[in-house]
Image (cartoon, rainbow, N blue to C red):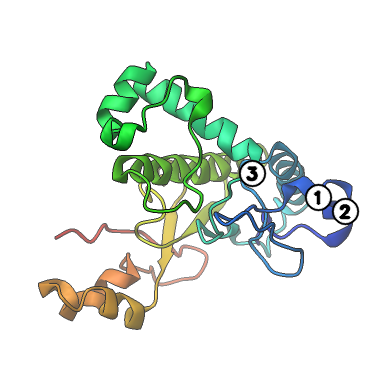
Amino acid sequence: MCPPLRTPPAWLIETNPSVKIVRNDGVVLEFGSRYSFCINHPFLLERGREMAEEMVAHYGNNPDIAGWHLDNEHGDEPDCHCPICRNKFQEWCRNRYGSIATLNREWGMIFWGLEFNSFEQIPTPMISKSYHSPSHLLAWKRFRSDSTIEAVAMQVKAVRKYSTQYLERRMQGLTRSDQTATSPDTECCLSLHSPALMTRSLRNSSASSNAEELSSGIRYRESKTWKQKSIRTESIRN
């Protein structure tokens, strides 16, 4: 059974429209499609926690429930650039670099005179005239990964409050999130990719012949009976 997180109903969004994702071009995503809500928004996280706890408290002892699948395809939503994400990214940078001088040096912001004077000046990498610093973009991706991991951890804690049943999650994209960070908390991490897309992205790589294997992200081992079924993961490493 799956406690949802990023598929809130229209009536809930109506009470707090600020939960909608702001894309890197400033467009606010409208209700009507899945995964169009900010995973850093306290309103979404709190309602998601409440939903998970209510579901598990009610169904956790049902013998027909084999286990729990957390939301779905974590990391598949577009990056959000709302004020909440901007403020949280600035705080993430403060914690990682300690001083704005260190950040400027490690990001190479002296180029074109782009140094910051404070962490409050740091933007999310929304569309600009040209490219943002590669180190800025890397830091942003790390921040987004940490944001996803925090959302997963919230749901894990909510489920484990009432249940010790089998627990799994599905992360979307090998490069979207650190898929090993929550491994100790769940029995299985599924990873969904398109072999065709992966093949195209790797066509200049000697690993392209292994794209289908790489895209699966995991190998499965199953026991003989469903109730004892155990899906374990092995990292596919080069």
Q: Secondary structure at mark 1?
A: helix
Q: Secondary structure at mark 2?
A: helix
Residue displayed at 33% across by 25% down:
103
Amino acid residing under circle 2: Glu
Would you call the spot at circle 2 few (<14 residues within 10 Å), some (14-19), or many (20 or more)?
few
Amino acid residing under circle 3: Cys
Q: Which residue is mark 1?
A: 17
| Residue 212 makes an appearance in the image | no
Residue displayed at 56% across by 59% down:
77
Would you call the spot at circle 1 few (<14 residues within 10 Å), some (14-19), or many (20 or more)?
some
The tag earlier along the polypeptide, 1 or 3, is 1
Direction from residue 100 to residue 199 in the image, left or right: left
Residue at the front extreme, as displayed: 112
Q: Is residue 185 above or below residue 225?
A: above
Instruction: Tell me the tag on residue 82.
Output: 3
Instruction: Tell me the tag on residue 14.
Output: 2
Q: Residue 32 placed where, x, y %?
A: 75, 69
Q: Is residue 79 above or below residue 40?
A: below
